[in-house]
Amino acid sequence: MTAVLEVSGLKTHFFTHAGVVKAVDGVDFAVKKGEVMGLVGESGSGKSITGFSILGLIDAPGRIVEGAIRFNGEDIANAPEDRLKSIRGNRISMIFQDPMMTLNPVLRIDSQMMEAILAHEKVSKKVAWERCRDALGLVGIPSPEERLRAYPHQLSGGMRQRVSIAIAFLNKPDLIIADEPTTALDVTIQAQIIHEAQKLTKQTGTAMIWITHDLAVVAGLADRISVMYAGRIVEQGLTDDVIDHPLHPYTVGLLGSVPTANKRGERLFQIEGMTPNMLALPEGCAFAPRCGFASPACKVPPAVEHVADRELRCYHPQSQVAAQ
Amino acid sequence: MTDATLQAGPRAPAKVETPFQRFRAEFFESRIAATAFVVIVIIVLLAVLAPWITPQNPYDLAQVDVLDGRLPPGSEAFAGYTMWLGSDGAGRDLYSAILYGLRISISVGLASGVIALFIGMTVGLIAAYAGGRTEAIIMRVVDLQLSFPASLVALMLVAALGKGVDKIILALVVAQWAYYARTVRATALVERGKEYVEAAQCLGLSRIRVVFRHILPNCLAPLIVVGTVQTAHAVSLEATLSFLGVGLPQTEPSLGVLIANGFEYMLSGRYWISVFPGIALLVTVASINLVGDQLRDVLNPRLKK
Amino acid sequence: MSVFVIRRLMQAFFVVFLMSVIVFFGVNIVGDPVYMLVSPDADQADIEAAIRRLGLDRPIWEQYLLFLKGAAQGNLGDSFIFGEPALKLILHHMPATLELAFSALFLAIAIGIPLGLFSGLYPDNPVSKGIMAGSILGFSLPTFWVGLMLILLFAVELGWLPSTGRGDTATIFGIETSLATWDGLKHIFLPALNLALLKISLAIRLTRAGVREAMGQDYVKYARAKGVSTRRIIFVHVMKNIMIPVVTVMGLEFGSLIGFSVVTETIFAWPGMGKLLIDAILQLDRPVVVAYLMIMVLFFVVINLIVDILYSILDPRVRLQDQGA
């Protein structure tokens, strides 16, 4: 399988009055056709900025300072706006976190859906409308004709997010970036939305980057997982490998803090300390100050290490420690 | 804290900013606002000192010579001094007339502003603190009045009351109190819900004390901002009414009256009689507005970075 | 929807009634119009006859009831000066005022919204800073003084445009208007611009603030992520959102334009009802003053009503709230 998207050495920095925020600072990953990649991290770890960088939607004072974003072989990092516009919503589409805020409150669903088609294809409004109707049906929305005439506030949160998913799949994109699409929803709705997204990627062969802070969400959804911390990917690998044998102490901590049935009664693990101040990151490994295994070696930023088919940035891989 | 600052101990207290010092520093950050503030000070000084720095009391008939009428700027008056801004139709030195006019315009604007502020503030506080029916009725009246433009309300009142300084002040007060009431009530409502008010109530302090000593001081910032803008508006509104001939009488010649007097000469090219008092009015109103804008930026905590 | 309209209508009716009390008693309590009407050498008998003729010998509450009775039949009393029904006088002068106010509103929107849009989209551009400085100045400049300056510049110095009167009118669609003739357009331009000035500043500020807020919203970023053209984002996504507050405020301002036209009409000798009002005030022609004020009250109430309904059509969220309540 070939890679739909290949991100290498991506650095997106924000030049604020208070200093330079290195929101994304050297990120490499690849997503293959039809693959779902979970991009996991705390808020402020740069996972959303990574998503926006791919689409070229970084606004001043931020910009992509380095790196390549190869989409189907073409480097689209800092590509001209016209080129990016023809890709956005067409070849790469995006689902946002809060469907309450992302759907324009004063426009009807039909016009917000149809514009995604009409922006990229010269088809009649009637054809566009029919495609929108079918897309709504596909994501499990009953009586789509009626919903198309509705305004966003007339739909429930879950319904609105289904609309967003339908919009994302409208142009049969090669890649969908979903930025915490279920965070704002109830747990029961969450499961339905995840199921819907999973089904559609399988059917259409669309690759997907699912950004979330919740490891549990991607555990059952993603083929691969990338764990981000302070602008860098600290560990990535196949989902089962990462979940069952986490190597990076941060991943271990994240997994330990997920409540599960077989840990009933046990105390949940807690990662010490606070999320780092992005304006004053520690030298070397950014996680070191919160890490129980940190050593003087951690003062030098760890390079990417390949352990089997895993990638890792750490001097103290955990499972190996345990094995010793 | 580094060692250096610790060693500088004895001098350190001098570096601590009082809230007022910080406010002053932030206010004067904007050069435009600083200039406007200086201009206001100068205008007020000119108005206050008018009798001592003008060559003529324009309303003392003994000092005015009709033969000096409609002289262009820079002409020499019969009495020997130069009329740098020319003279009006009755032979008054315009420079003198403008300074005396400023006195009246500013007094009327300030007086109406202060009275409206006190009435609006009281009503707003009552509404916010009493709540329930009282608040609903008061706010209905406020909303009703605010749905009519202030200029129309003032015009209605002068239509009923007639000319005169007291009447125009009354009209301006009635036209403006609602703005203060709305502001105070909105701020007081926010403050009332805060914990320090609850704490004060728990201490058993009287209602009056809670309102005036605890809530009111926290409403002052928005009040000052609205007060500045409304005062500028009052000065401008008084000038407008006087220009229309329904505001101040000829015996109390504010800037608006001066401009109205010059209007008839305008079409014959004697522009200065209207233009110079107009510039004085414009500079006054614009300066107050600019200061008000900056006050809003500095005093509004939401805009702080 | 109909419950909403009926409730608003009842509120409006109450307001009109309340204001009629305030206006009538306010205007009729002070001053003595009789002395303005009788000749200076009239004797006591003449004066008393005049008082009776004008109905001023009755107690004020009785005068008010008579006024109410008349008002219900569309009669707001006769002018003391002209002897004609006050309402007829005002209606006669109304088209000129409406025409002026509409032209000013048009100018305010046509000039203010594009300028505000530009300065909202490019806040750091020097042109935007110039626009904002201009709008602050526009708020500070007293309308009447700007009117004088416009006359001084365009009529006296340059001689391009006439400074007084309404000019030729022509009839289109049964409405007599000066917008239909070149001479009329020349006459209306300065007063309309003068009247519009404050509203241009207002439209600039509202539009700019709205654009800046909307541009930061997620729905704009989402639209960009869909690949929607910048033009569509600005003119559909952003404009449709900011048009709600702008339409509301500008609509409410239409009433204030009519109120402010008193000033502009006086300066430019525009034969509208504002000038009629000033003359009536100066001559203590109470019925005309009362009639004018009542018509203004009615105007404002109707405008508020229309804006409320418009608002509920433009913003689907309002409608829903009201149904829920």
Image (cartoon, rainbow, N blue to C red):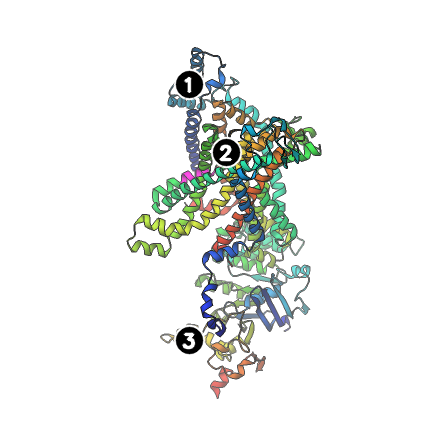
What residue would you read off at disc 2? B152
Foreground residue among C92 and C238: C92
Identify residue for label 1: C56
Q: Percent x, y for residue B96?
A: 57, 36
- Of the residues shown, which amino acid type is indicated by label 2? Leu
Residue most extreme to the front: B80
- Mark 2 element type: helix
Is A167 located above or below residue A309 in the figure?
above
Kind of residue indicated by mark 3: Phe
C89 w.r.t. A229: above or below: above
Asked if residue C244 shows in the view, the reply is no
Q: Where is residue B184 in the image (x, y as percent from the top left)?
A: 42, 46
Judging depth in this view, the residue of A290 and B158 nearest the camera is B158
- Magenta stretch holds residue C297: no
The residue lying toward the viewer, choosing from A148 and C4, is: C4
Q: Which chain carries label 1?
A: C
